[in-house]
Amino acid sequence: MRAVVDTNFIVALIVEDDVNHLNALDVWGKLEEAVLPAIAVSELAYFLLKHHVDLEVLEEVLSDPKIEVEPLKEEDLIFALRNSNKIKTYDDFNDFLILSAAVRLGLKLLTYDRVLQEIYQKHVK
């Protein structure tokens, strides 16, 4: 399986006391490739710094052979802007960039964000 992974999926993978950790490990075992949008890399760096975790963890994530970093494309920005009526915060904007990557690549989106998952479901039907 190949899928776009949201930041919270990666966090659940690396944080053992995350409520979704075991589920994330199970899903990770089934993944052949995890497409990580570049904006999610930035969000992950912010999360690690905020929680005083060495950025070497990010290096480990990026060096995992399953991870493919997906660059931000102009069409992702346009997609987010076309959905600006649903964007209230910086995090919402980032979520639409991640969502756009999944839609653009025709891949499943792995996220523990229920709102983002609902929006994703509407865009893939």
Image: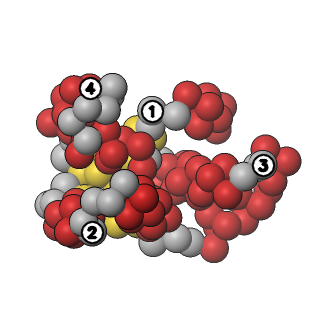
Question: Which residue type does callout 3 highlight?
Answer: Lys
Question: Which residue type does callout 1 highlight?
Answer: Tyr
Q: Are marks 2 and 4 in contact (CB under 8 Å)?
A: no
- Tell me residue 63's x, y (percent): 17, 67
Compared with 23, 48 (above or below) is: below
Question: Which callout, 2 or 1, points at the residue further toward the start of the chain?
Answer: 2
The residue singled out by tag 2 in the image is 55
Task: State whether residue 68 appears in this view.
Answer: no
Secondary element at tag 1: loop
Most distant residue in the front direction: 52
Residue at figure coordinates x 26%, y 26% from the top left: 23
- Tell me residue 88's x, y (percent): 78, 49
Residue 23: give its label: 4
Tell me the quarter of the image containing the C terminus.
top right
The residue singled out by tag 3 in the image is 88
Secondary element at tag 3: loop
Question: Which callout, 1 or 4, points at the residue further toward the start of the chain?
Answer: 4
The residue singled out by tag 1 in the image is 112
Secondary element at tag 4: helix
